[in-house]
Each structure stands twice: as structure tokens, then as C-alpha cells.
């Protein structure tokens, strides 16, 4: 009888140990990542109209304003390449610090929208996204669908947060190109609200993006599965002067499609996988040769999306 009890106790112990090891090796790891760049890597500015501001750039200022009857708007973009490709996003918050203490006697609402076109923080104005190139509509090109909103009434100071989880997921999944966020008020009669920018000397008060995510714990396998060959894009850069005639995407998953985007977000061409490859003749959908510059691509397949860029030098 005693031997049976000892055997049963030993078996229970083994099961518990195996279960604990399995749970530990497959546990998800939760992490919080803060992206808070300084002047060298930041991409933020405000744009303004009225009093001759339509063609002025404010990208080097230490503060950014919005509101004032919607004559001022804030544009901001964060580089997401530091987020692991296998990250499962649980939350993402855009956080800006107010430049001073406010007391709002009337309700103020600040809205966040997704920008839909390329812009440069040291060139952007109310009328132009970059020097000598107009927005499609003055005041910035953005998705009319609201990403998030924050209401104020009474005293307001310090940090303000907006939930931007949905858009961060879409950008990381390659569903849309990351052109950043636009913040605005809708026809508010009051004075502008000012926030601190990435140009600020005190780095702890610069704008930040706080992303919480999980990654799968790695469990060593005695016989790992063979790794699929990585997707290759060549030649990159593309130089007709060196005899280049097309750009080839190789090792594509079955059924994949490749979409080529202008840096402003316009689709230039769509390619379909054939025998693991897709070839681009470096022309747009109307058959015109594309000009020199950077172009983005997004590879879409049942296995997921992958994004990158190609350079054309004519």
C-alpha cells in the first residue's frame, strides 16, 4: 500500500513539473515600449492659417498649437521599426504634454485623425506637405474617420493621452502606410491650446508613443522546422544607367500580391505572384515610367504582410 502511495505521489510530481515547464516555455511576455525621440529623429510640427501663416513652417519650434477656430493643427509621426515583428499589440497611447496650465470655461475637444500623405516636419505648412508640393486640400490630408478624441473642461495641465491602438495595429500589419497623426479641434471659438514638441531641450516632456505588447516565449525545439527563404527585392536601388530594366520580388508566398506606393500614399502598381516571383517594370498603372525617388511596397499574403522601400535613380 505504501509503495502505491509513493508511486502515485511520484507520478503527480512529474505531471506538475512537466506542466510548469510547458507553461513557462510557452508563456507570453508582456512589455511596454516608449518611443520618445529628440530633435534629430522627431517628426512633428503644427500648421497655421491666417495672418500670413499659410506658407510658414513651425517645425523647429519648441511648442505646437491647435484650435483657434481650427486655424491651427498638429502633425506628428513616430518611427515604429523598434517594435518586434511578432508583437501582439494590446494598447497604444499618443501622449503630449501641455505647454502651460489651462482653465477651460467651456468644453474643448481635441480630435486625432490618421494622416494619409507624406510630409516633412521642417517643410510642412498649411498649404504644402513638402516644399513646392501642395496638400490635396489645405490644412493637411487626413482620414475623416475619427481615431480618438479627448475632452477638457475646467483645469487642465501636464500630460494628455489619446488611444491610438487601432491605427498602430494597422500600420504594423502593413494595412496602411504610417504617415502619422493629425490633431485638431472643430471650429472652436477659443484661443489655441499649446503642447510641447520634440524640439524641447527637456527630453522627459517631449511627445511620446507608449505601446504595450506581448510576444510569445521561445521554447527550444530539438528539431526546428526549416525556415522559409526570405523575400528578396532586386535590384535596389534601381538604376537604368547600369542596365536595370525591372525590379524582381523573389521567394514570395503562394498567392501573394505586391502593391507599390508613391511616398505620398498613391498606389502606383499592383503585381501578382507567379512561381514565387513578381516583376515590376518600374511604370505606373497607366504605363508611364516612374520618376526617381523612394517608393514603398507592401507584400500581402495569407501568411501576413511585409513592407519595405525601393529606390529609383534615373
Image (spheres, rainbow, N blue to C red):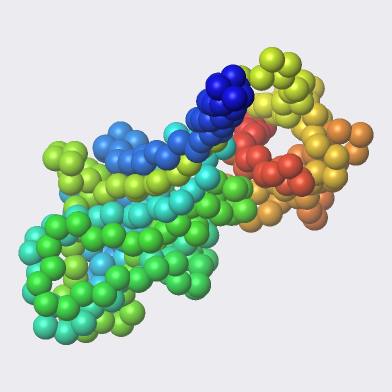
Q: How many marks?
A: 0
**286 shown above or below 308:** below
Specify whether 212 is left or right of 260.
Answer: left
Q: Position of residue 292 (x, y in %)?
A: 63, 38
Q: Position of residue 1 (x, y in %)?
A: 59, 25
Q: Which residue shows up at 50% across the image and 57% down it?
A: 167
Determine if residue 124 is in view.
no
The residue furthest top is 222
**116 shown above or below 204:** below
Determine if residue 159 is in view.
yes
Q: Position of residue 97 (x, y in %)?
A: 19, 55
**143 shown above or below 240:** below
Q: Which quarter of the rendered picture does the C terminus lie within?
A: top right
Q: Which residue shows up at 19% across the image and 68% down it?
A: 193
Specify whether 233 is left or right of 47.
Answer: right
Q: Position of residue 307 (x, y in %)?
A: 63, 40
The quarter of the picture where residue 223 lies is: top right
**125 shown above or below 270:** below
The residue furthest right is 275
Compare residues 181 and 261 and report the one nearer the observer.
181
Specify whether 58 is left or right of 277.
Answer: left
Q: Which residue shows up at 61% across the image and 36% down it?
A: 309
Q: Which residue shows up at 65% across the image and 40% down it?
A: 306
Compare residues 141 and 151 and report the one nearer the observer.
151
The quarter of the picture where residue 286 lies is: bottom right
The residue furthest front is 1
Specify whether 68 is left or right of 217.
Answer: left
Compare residues 99 and 167 and report the one nearer the observer.
167
Amino acid at each position: 500500500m505504501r509503495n502505491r502511495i509513493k508511486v502515485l505521489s511520484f507520478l503527480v510530481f512529474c505531471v506538475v513539473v512537466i506542466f510548469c515547464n510547458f507553461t513557462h516555455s510557452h508563456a507570453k511576455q508582456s512589455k511596454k515600449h516608449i518611443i520618445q525621440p529628440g530633435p534629430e529623429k522627431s517628426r512633428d510640427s503644427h500648421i497655421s492659417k491666417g495672418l500670413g501663416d499659410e506658407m510658414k513652417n513651425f517645425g523647429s519650434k519648441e511648442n505646437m498649437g491647435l484650435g483657434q477656430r481650427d486655424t491651427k493643427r498638429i502633425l506628428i509621426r513616430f518611427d515604429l521599426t523598434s517594435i518586434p515583428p511578432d508583437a501582439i499589440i494590446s494598447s497604444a497611447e499618443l501622449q503630449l504634454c501641455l505647454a502651460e496650465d489651462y482653465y477651460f470655461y467651456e468644453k474643448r475637444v481635441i480630435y486625432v485623425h490618421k494622416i494619409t500623405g507624406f510630409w516633412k516636419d521642417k517643410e510642412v505648412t498649411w498649404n504644402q506637405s513638402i516644399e513646392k508640393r501642395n496638400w490635396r486640400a489645405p490644412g493637411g490630408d487626413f482620414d475623416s474617420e475619427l481615431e480618438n478624441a479627448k475632452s477638457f473642461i475646467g483645469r487642465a495641465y501636464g500630460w494628455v493621452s489619446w488611444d491610438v491602438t487601432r491605427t498602430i495595429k494597422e500600420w504594423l500589419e502593413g494595412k496602411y502606410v504610417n504617415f502619422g497623426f493629425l490633431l485638431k479641434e472643430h471650429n472652436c471659438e477659443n484661443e489655441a491650446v499649446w503642447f510641447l514638441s520634440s524640439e524641447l531641450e527637456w527630453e522627459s516632456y517631449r511627445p511620446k508613443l507608449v505601446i504595450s505588447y506581448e510576444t510569445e516565449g521561445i521554447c527550444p525545439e530539438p528539431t526546428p522546422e526549416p525556415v522559409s527563404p526570405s523575400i528578396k527585392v532586386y535590384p535596389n536601388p534601381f538604376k537604368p544607367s547600369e542596365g536595370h530594366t525591372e525590379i524582381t520580388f523573389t521567394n514570395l508566398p503562394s498567392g501573394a500580391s505586391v502593391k507599390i506606393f508613391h511616398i505620398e500614399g498613391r498606389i502606383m502598381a499592383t503585381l501578382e505572384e507567379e512561381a514565387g516571383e513578381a516583376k515590376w517594370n518600374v511604370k505606373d498603372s497607366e504605363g508611364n515610367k516612374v520618376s526617381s525617388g523612394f517608393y514603398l511596397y507592401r507584400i500581402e499574403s495569407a501568411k501576413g504582410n511585409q513592407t519595405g522601400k525601393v529606390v529609383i535613380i534615373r
